[in-house]
Image: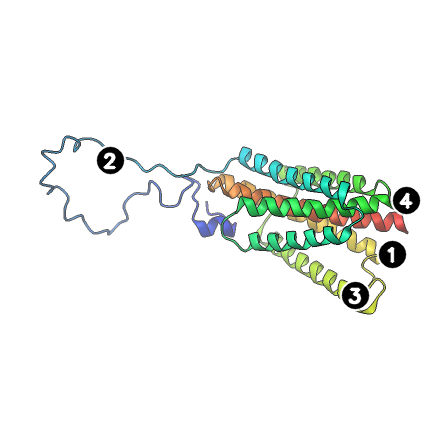
């Protein structure tokens, strides 16, 4: 069965062995070895009767335990960074915003690399956590938004569990059409967010109105739904990676993708709760 995941298809994983080309039979039409049976040293070589050494892969295939461990490590780093931001940078949002911008650059850098770089992923997680912690602490200090970060955390967990159940029971099926729809919708959402930010910066106020009122609530709901759909894509990536024998290092990419999606959902959930409680 051929994988539809472009990452695993490009790297040539097969469901039989987990490694492209390993243990494959000789190809038809290959030229015969002109030296076969004519080795003058075969008779005197005491090791000639021993079987040749077998190739041993340098890494074993990825397992669910690998994904769980690395995702826990990455999310744990986010939580550690968030604790630092909450305790020390709530009153210094400028530093937190700087950390968030650097985290965004690191995230883009890893996204364009063909192989995972664990140090890069963990650095992203730490800096993103600092930003989230400082922002959440600041919002929590506002009387009408007190407790909003905890509500956003609980909401994010609820979305994760709901989508995991929906995916495992095949209520949500990830197909090529589903993937295209989610990606196009996400691109449109991000572009609208950027346009709204530009209008807010240069024209003042709330820009196009995507950050407050009824339109802001609707936009926030769309953001949470998109995050939930991206979770389904992440689950599919993990499932395909295990089924097609992706190398163990690919579990870092799975952890990175899940972390990105959960951060997205938390941010949209926090913004939605802020709008609902602020109106």
Q: Residue at x 74, y 65 (%)?
A: 195
Figure check: 233 above or below 180: above
| Secondary element at tag 2 | loop
- Mark whose residue sits in front, 2 or 3: 3
Alpha carbons under labels 2 and 1: distance apart = 73 Å
Residue contact at pointers 1 and 4, CB within 8 angstroms = no
Residue contact at pointers 4 and 3, CB within 8 angstroms = no
Residue under circle 1?
A: 213
Residue under circle 2?
A: 52
Residue contact at pointers 2 and 1, CB within 8 angstroms = no
- Mark whose residue sits in front, 4 or 2: 4
Alpha carbons under labels 2 and 3: distance apart = 69 Å
| Secondary element at tag 3 | helix
**46 sits to left or right of 152:** left
Alpha carbons under labels 4 and 2: distance apart = 74 Å
Residue under circle 4?
A: 143
Q: Nearer the viewer, residue 254 or 202?
A: 202
| Secondary element at tag 4 | helix
Residue under circle 3?
A: 201
Label 4: how many Cα within 10 Å (few below 14, some 14–19, many 20+): few
Figure check: 171 above or below 186: above
Image spot of residue 203 (x, y percent): 82, 69
Label 2: how many Cα within 10 Å (few below 14, some 14–19, many 20+): few
- Mark whose residue sits in front, 1 or 4: 4
Who comes first in sequence, dot 2 or dot 1? 2
- Mark whose residue sits in front, 1 or 3: 3
Q: Quadrant of residue 202?
A: bottom right
Q: Quadrant of residue 98?
A: bottom right
Q: Residue furthest bottom?
A: 203
Q: Quadrant of residue 170?
A: top right
Label 1: how many Cα within 10 Å (few below 14, some 14–19, many 20+): some
Image spot of residue 176 (x, y percent): 57, 53
């Amino acid at each position: 069965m051929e994988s539809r995941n472009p990452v695993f298809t490009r790297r040539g994983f097969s469901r039989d062995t987990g490694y492209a080309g390993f243990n494959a039979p000789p190809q038809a039409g290959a030229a015969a070895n002109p030296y076969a049976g004519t080795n003058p040293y075969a008779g005197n070589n005491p090791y000639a009767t021993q079987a040749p050494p077998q190739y041993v892969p340098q890494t074993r295939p990825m397992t669910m335990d690998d994904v769980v461990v690395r995702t826990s490590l990455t999310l744990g780093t986010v939580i550690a960074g968030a604790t630092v931001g909450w305790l020390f940078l709530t009153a210094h949002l400028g530093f937190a915003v700087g950390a968030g911008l650097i985290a965004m650059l690191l995230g883009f850098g890893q996204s364009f690399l063909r192989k995972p770089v664990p140090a890069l992923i963990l650095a992203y997680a730490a800096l993103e956590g600092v930003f989230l912690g400082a922002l959440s602490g600041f919002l929590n200090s506002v009387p009408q938004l007190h407790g909003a970060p905890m509500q956003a955390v609980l909401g994010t967990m609820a979305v994760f569990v709901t989508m995991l159940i929906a995916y495992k029971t095949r209520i949500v099926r990830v197909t090529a059409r589903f993937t295209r729809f989610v990606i196009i919708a996400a691109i449109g959402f991000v572009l609208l967010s950027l346009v709204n930010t530009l209008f807010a910066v240069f024209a003042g106020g709330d820009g196009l109105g995507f950050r407050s009122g009824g339109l802001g609530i609707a936009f926030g709901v769309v953001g949470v739904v998109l995050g939930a759909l991206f979770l389904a894509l992440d689950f599919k990536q993990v499932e395909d990676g295990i089924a097609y024998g992706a190398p163990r290092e690919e579990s870092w990419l799975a952890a990175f993708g899940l972390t990105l999606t959960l951060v997205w959902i938390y941010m949209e959930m926090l913004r939605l709760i802020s709008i609902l409680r602020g109106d």
